[in-house]
Image: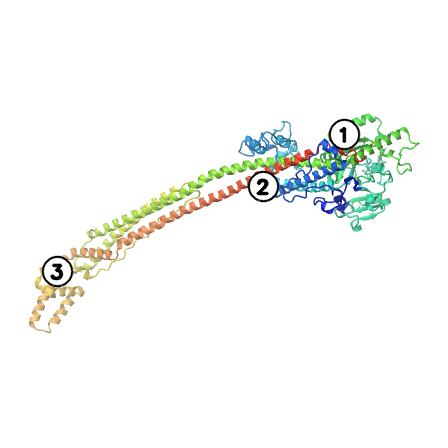
């Protein structure tokens, strides 16, 4: 199209990064970037917080009237492009947070005001009051229309007779999830079966689709060309209708279903004035200037290609000449580059593809051709109901009207059906619904400009007039009301998506607020528990240590006392041992010693038993100090704690029975024996009595008689001493053995050693219990720390989410204001555009 309408300044600097060329067609970006060159849109905001601030003041009827239509259109395009860019940024931010920081949740029936409790333990009022809190930012008394709308959607209880799917549908438009699962499952049931991450993944797909859609809309708003999709039931007469619009037999017409591919008819100017057909295998890579991306076909062979190339080609582009002048031609109109797309007839197989095609942003207008004889089939109704959600307006052509006898009745019936499937189209039925007979249009006639020749009957004239009126409406719609056909879908989409963004952000902000509050409360109560635990750890450890020391002191004292008592009483332990005479004195001494040592062993044993008892008590006490801690305390085997102290046997020597005391005793009783007596006794103690005496006698015998006399005396004394010994041995041995044992025990510090040994072993065991206690405390403290860390993390996460969603909500609110400032009546200002 000519750039005159946009007062183009073709500076490259003015191109926007959001200006993406439409796929396949017009691959040279300059075409549309130049066209919007004077539209100073906000450059693609890389970071979100750039909300397009209105650079130019909002449009008012007064200001609007002062501006030329071009300027109004440019103003609106610019604003819409800015809003599209910002909406895309929001969706990208949604995707980012949804990926790993916050699973965006989907509002469904169970989470409305009435059933809110199932979602959280908090009161519904909390949810609402948090919303009220959120609104108090600027003026608490002023609630924007946008806010009010979101509030109503989120907090109005569903109507009694409303199914869950319908209920969801009233909340979301663009991000609505298809939750039908067969006929039996309600959306709510399906929702309940999905976990948070699955829901957020489903939503992510919607965000991706939304971004793609916005990019297409950006391209479309920036682009000035228009595409008109001609869809309809099989054999409704679509191809005939397209041919009638072109006044040429371009598209193949047949009684049989024949159009099996999407055929786009463009003005020949789009192909450097050459009429030809491009059969395209991959529409994404199609480039008109690169013949390898398509197969060139003669226009006359189009029928065969469409008939036979269904599997081979994805789409056909037909470049053809429109012989009419610019005032009559649709393709070659001098205002907007228009392409007509003839779709395959709707049936089960093609319904989905055609619906997808219709959703493409390149499609500005949908003309739905319906046979006046058949009215709307089920496929047609489904297609129309979807398409009316996608596109602002639909054009409905009721074709084959010539075959209808009761025309008024037919009109009435058809309009009633339109009212049902597309109320908006019904509202503008005058302009948008046409009853025509496509075959009545003279094709390729000389007098093509007039259509009606002299030979035409009045019925023909009527039919041609009807068709001309349809054409006029179509031209008016596509060309004059460009804002409506081009900008309106973008506006419509932004309006819907802002609503969804508002619902999702407000809903998720509510959830995040409650989660943050919950985490905060848990942190607060956790803090007290944590402090209590730390204090308990200190005090209980001190208490346990004291318990250890007290128990060990007690064991030590007891053991010492017990052993000392045993030692001091060992004399009496030999009382029961019988002395059986001198011949058995040695055995007697050993028995006495063993009995005494046994007595001491008993003392050791009872000390150990006592220590065991006290150790068990102490361990029990320590373990009971930490009953509140999680985990089981260690079990200790005290049975094998002590090896009974084995007292080393103490060897008994004969000398042990003759000490200075004995010698002295002998001296006192037998003074004349003197030193020699003692020596004898000593010798006697060293050797056996007779050999000693003999040796002494022998020794003395070398001297003289007197000496021998003396020796005899000594012998007598020795015998006396022996007699004494014989007499006293039963009494002396226990005393001497006891003395010897006591002496040995004192020398070896036996009591201390044993007391230390027993105490040490007890302490060792109790220490294990205190170690266990400490480690349980350590684990409990560590657990609490980890809990606190995860709670802090949860709190931070929720808090950040609250800020995030608040921010998004406020931004979408401002964007909604900007959108509303553009007005609702998009076609008014363009009425004069074409004139
Ligand atoms: N009587 C009458 N016949 C028509 C009219 N328009 C189309 N036809 C006939 O209807 C038949 C089908 O026409 P097409 O244009 O091929 O229909 P279509 O919708 O393109 O068919 P498919 O693309 O195969 O779905 C042809 O025989 C046409 O001549 C009309 O207004 N009146």
Where does label 3 land, which residue? 664
Which label lies toward us, 1 or 3? Answer: 1
Of pointers 2 and 1, the one earlier in the residue sequence = 2
Residue placed most toward the observer, 796 or 30: 30
Residue at 13 percent of width and 69 percent of height: 696
Q: Is mark 1 within 8 Å of ligand 1?
A: no
Query: Mark 1 packing: few (<14 Cα in 10 Å), some, or many (20+)?
Result: few
Residue placed most toward the observer, 445 or 667: 445
Where does label 1 land, which residue? 428
Ligand 1: quadrant of the figure: top right
Looking at the image, can residue 115 be seen? yes
Residue 393 lies left or right of residue 739; in this view the side is: right
Residue 545 lies left or right of residue 825; in this view the side is: left
Of pointers 3 and 2, the one earlier in the residue sequence = 2
Of pointers 1 and 3, the one earlier in the residue sequence = 1
| Quarter containing the N terminus | top right
Q: CA distance from mark 3 to mark 2?
A: 104 Å
Question: Which image quarter: residue 98?
Answer: top right
Where does label 2 land, which residue? 102
Task: Decide: is 542 above or below 386.
Answer: below
């Amino acid at each position: 199209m000519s750039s005159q309408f946009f007062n183009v300044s073709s500076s490259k600097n003015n191109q926007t990064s959001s200006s993406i060329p439409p796929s396949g067609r017009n691959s040279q970006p300059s075409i549309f970037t130049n066209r919007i060159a004077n539209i100073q849109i906000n450059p693609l905001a890389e970071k979100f917080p750039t909300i397009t601030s209105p650079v130019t003041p909002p449009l008012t009827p007064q200001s609007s009237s002062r501006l030329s239509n071009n300027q109004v259109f440019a103003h609106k395009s610019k604003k819409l492009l800015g809003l599209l860019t910002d909406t895309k940024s929001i969706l990208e931010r949604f995707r980012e947070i949804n990926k790993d920081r916050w699973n965006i949740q989907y509002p469904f029936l169970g989470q409305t005001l009435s059933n809110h409790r199932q979602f959280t333990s908090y009161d519904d009022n909390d949810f609402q009051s948090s919303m009220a809190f959120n609104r108090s930012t600027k003026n608490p008394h002023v609630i924007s229309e946008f806010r009010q709308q979101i509030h109503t959607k989120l907090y109005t209880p569903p109507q009694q007779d409303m199914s869950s799917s319908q209920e969801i549908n009233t909340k979301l438009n663009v991000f609505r999830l298809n939750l039908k699962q067969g006929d039996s499952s309600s959306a709510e049931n399906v929702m309940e079966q999905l976990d948070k991450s699955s829901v957020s993944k489903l939503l992510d797909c919607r965000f991706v689709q939304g971004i793609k859609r916005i990019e297409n809309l950006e391209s479309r708003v920036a682009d000035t060309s228009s595409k008109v999709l001609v869809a309809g039931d099989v054999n409704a007469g679509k191809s005939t209708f397209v041919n009638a619009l072109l006044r040429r037999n371009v598209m193949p017409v047949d009684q049989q279903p024949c159009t099996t591919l999407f055929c786009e008819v463009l003005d020949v100017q789009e192909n450097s004035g050459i009429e030809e057909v491009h059969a395209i295998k991959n529409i994404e890579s199609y480039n008109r200037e690169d013949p390898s991306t398509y197969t060139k076909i003669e226009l006359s062979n189009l029928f065969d290609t469409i008939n036979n190339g269904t599997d081979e080609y994805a789409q056909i582009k037909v470049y053809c000449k429109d012989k009419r002048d610019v005032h009559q031609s649709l393709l070659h109109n001098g205002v907007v580059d228009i392409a007509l797309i003839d779709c395959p007839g709707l049936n089960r197989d093609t319904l989905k593809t055609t619906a997808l095609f219709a959703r493409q942003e390149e499609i500005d207008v949908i003309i739905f051709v319906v046979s006046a004889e058949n009215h709307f089939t089920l496929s047609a109704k489904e297609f129309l109901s979807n398409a009316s959600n996608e596109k602002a307006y639909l054009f409905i052509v009721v074709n084959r009207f010539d075959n209808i006898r009761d025309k008024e009745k037919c009109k009435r019936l058809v309009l009633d059906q339109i009212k049902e499937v597309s109320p908006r189209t019904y509202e503008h039925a005058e302009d948008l619904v046409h009853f025509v007979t496509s075959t009545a249009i003279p094709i390729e006639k000389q007098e093509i400009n007039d259509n009606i020749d002299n030979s035409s009957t009045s019925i023909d004239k009527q039919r041609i007039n009807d068709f001309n009126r349809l054409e006029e409406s179509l031209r008016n719609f596509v060309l004059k009301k460009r804002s409506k056909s081009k900008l309106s879908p973008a506006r419509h989409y932004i309006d819907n998506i802002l609503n969804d963004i508002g619902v999702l952000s407000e809903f998720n902000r509510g959830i995040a607020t409650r989660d943050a509050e919950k985490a905060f409360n848990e942190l607060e109560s956790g803090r007290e528990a944590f402090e209590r635990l730390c204090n308990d750890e200190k005090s209980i450890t001190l208490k346990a240590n004291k318990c250890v020391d007290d128990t060990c002191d007690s064991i030590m004292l007891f053991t010492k006392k017990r052993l000392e008592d045993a030692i001091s009483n060992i004399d009496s332990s030999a009382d029961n041992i019988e002395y059986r005479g001198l011949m058995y004195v040695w055995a007697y001494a050993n028995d006495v010693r063993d009995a005494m040592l046994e007595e001491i062993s008993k003392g050791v044993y009872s000390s150990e038993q006592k220590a065991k008892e006290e150790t068990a008590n102490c361990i029990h006490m320590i373990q009971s100090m930490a009953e509140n801690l999680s985990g089981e305390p260690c079990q200790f085997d005290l049975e094998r704690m002590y090896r009974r102290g084995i007292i080393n046997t103490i060897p008994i020597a004969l000398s042990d029975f003759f000490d200075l005391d004995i010698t002295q005793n002998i001296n006192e009783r037998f003074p004349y024996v003197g030193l020699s007596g003692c020596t004898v006794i000593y010798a006697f103690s060293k050797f056996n009595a007779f050999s000693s005496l003999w040796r002494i006698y022998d020794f003395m015998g070398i001297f003289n008689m007197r000496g021998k006399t003396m020796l005899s005396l000594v012998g007598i004394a020795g015998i006396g001493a022996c007699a004494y010994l014989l007499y006293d041995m039963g009494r002396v041995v226990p005393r001497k053995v006891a003395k010897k044992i006591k002496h040995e025990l004192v020398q070896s510090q036996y009591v201390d050693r044993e007391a230390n040994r027993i105490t040490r072993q007890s302490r060792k065991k109790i220490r294990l219990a205190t170690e266990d206690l400490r480690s349980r405390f350590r684990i409990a403290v560590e657990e609490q720390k980890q809990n606190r860390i995860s709670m802090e993390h949860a709190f931070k996460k929720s808090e950040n989410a609250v800020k995030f969603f608040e921010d998004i909500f406020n931004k979408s609110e401002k964007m909604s204001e900007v959108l509303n400032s553009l007005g609702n009546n998009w076609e008014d200002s363009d009425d004069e555009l074409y004139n």
